[in-house]
Amino acid sequence: MNTTTDTHWRDDLTLIGALSTVNRQLALYVLRLLDVDAQRAPELPITDESTLGRRMIELGQAIHARAARRQPPPYPPSDDGTGRARPLIS
């Protein structure tokens, strides 16, 4: 069993779940803004708006971390079994 891959898979599932939740919250937020603009609803509480903004930042950082994790290393691993990277040009 590859625990690194398993951990990443669990992290990805957690990220997908969080993105789904925030996606729904963003849809409701946009609808609320439209209702406020049409004077059909009061402004959203500042704390709610701030919480949504913070959550979006956190998810943006999680997406960035996932992308960095998927980035291949700049050097291929060595062939000598040490695990150290070797330069592309010798």
Image (cartoon, helix red, strand yellow):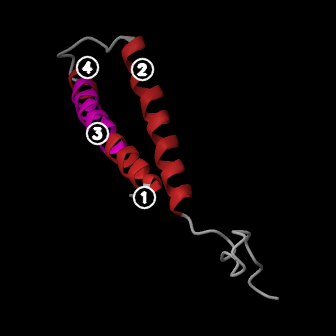
- Residue 26 part of the magenta segment: yes
Determine which residue is flagged by label 3.
17
Q: Nearer the viewer, mark 1 or mark 2?
A: 1
Q: Earlier in the sequence, mark 1 or mark 3?
A: 1
Per the image, the residue denoted by label 1 is 2
Quadrant where the N terminus is found in the figure: bottom left
Of the two numbered discs 3 and 4 on the same chain, state the one appearing first in sequence.
3
Q: Residue at x 69, y 69 (%)?
A: 83
Please name the residue that numbered disc 4 is placed on.
Answer: 36
> Is tag 1's residue or tag 2's residue first in the polypeptide sequence?
1
Q: Residue at x 50, y 57 (%)?
A: 67
85 or 46: nearer the eye? 85
Q: Which residues are magenta?
A: 15-32
Q: Is residue 58 above or below residue 41?
A: below
Q: Amino acid at mark 4?
A: Val
Q: Position of residue 89 (x, y in %)?
A: 78, 87
Asked whether 81 or 57 is in front, the reply is: 81
Cα gap from disc 1 to disc 2, whole angstroms: 36 Å
Q: Nearer the viewer, residue 36 or 5?
A: 5
